[in-house]
Image (tube, helix red, strand yellow):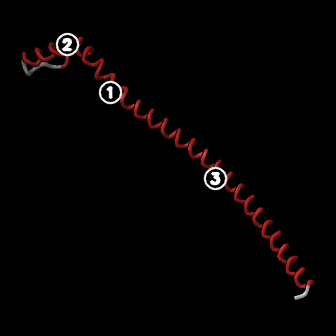
Amino acid sequence: MSIKQGAGIKNSQRRETTTDLEQLKKLLDENIQLTKNLEERTKKIHGYIKWLRVWSILKIIIILAPIILGIIFLPSILGEYQEVFNGLGELSDVGTSLDLNSLINGL
């Protein structure tokens, strides 16, 4: 092997390494760009999931609040009208031939 052949092999190896390094740099830049895109998408997905959680909690509150308030306040409200309900029961005990006008007058 002559010196010129040895130098030609080294030069071709250098070209291959520089092209390999350029390809690696190109792939690395592409990978960084794809990672940034994935990060943006992930942030959007996290925001979407956060709002889904908020809306699900609001739905539960909208459903449960009237039920809880009804359990708390209905007994006192019904207690106030208990006399009216008892009066209707007494009217129905009087006879079965009561018409609507007699019920209205009884109230």
Q: Which residue is mark 3?
A: 38
Q: CA distance from mark 3 to mark 2?
A: 68 Å
* Residue for point 57% across, 41% down: 47
Mark earlier in primary sequence (3, 2):
3
Local SS, label 3: helix
* Residue for point 71% across, 55% down: 32
Mark 2 Cα-neighbour bin, 10 Å: few <14, some 14–19, many ≥20: some
Of residues 10 and 49, the one nearer the viewer is 10
Q: Please, is residue 50 above or below residue 88 in the view? A: below
Of residues 14 and 35, the one nearer the viewer is 14
Q: What's the amino acid at mark 3?
A: Leu
What x and y, as percent, mark residue 78? 24, 16
What x and y, as percent, mark residue 45? 57, 46
Residue 84 numbered tag: 2
Q: Please, is residue 23 above or below residue 74 in the view? A: below
Horizontal side of 82 relative to 70 (left or right) equals left
Q: Which residue is mark 1?
A: 67
Q: What's the amino acid at mark 2?
A: Val
Q: What's the amino acid at mark 1?
A: Ile
What x and y, as percent, mark residue 97? 9, 21
Local SS, label 2: helix
Mark earlier in primary sequence (3, 1):
3
Extreme residue toward the bottom, this view? 1
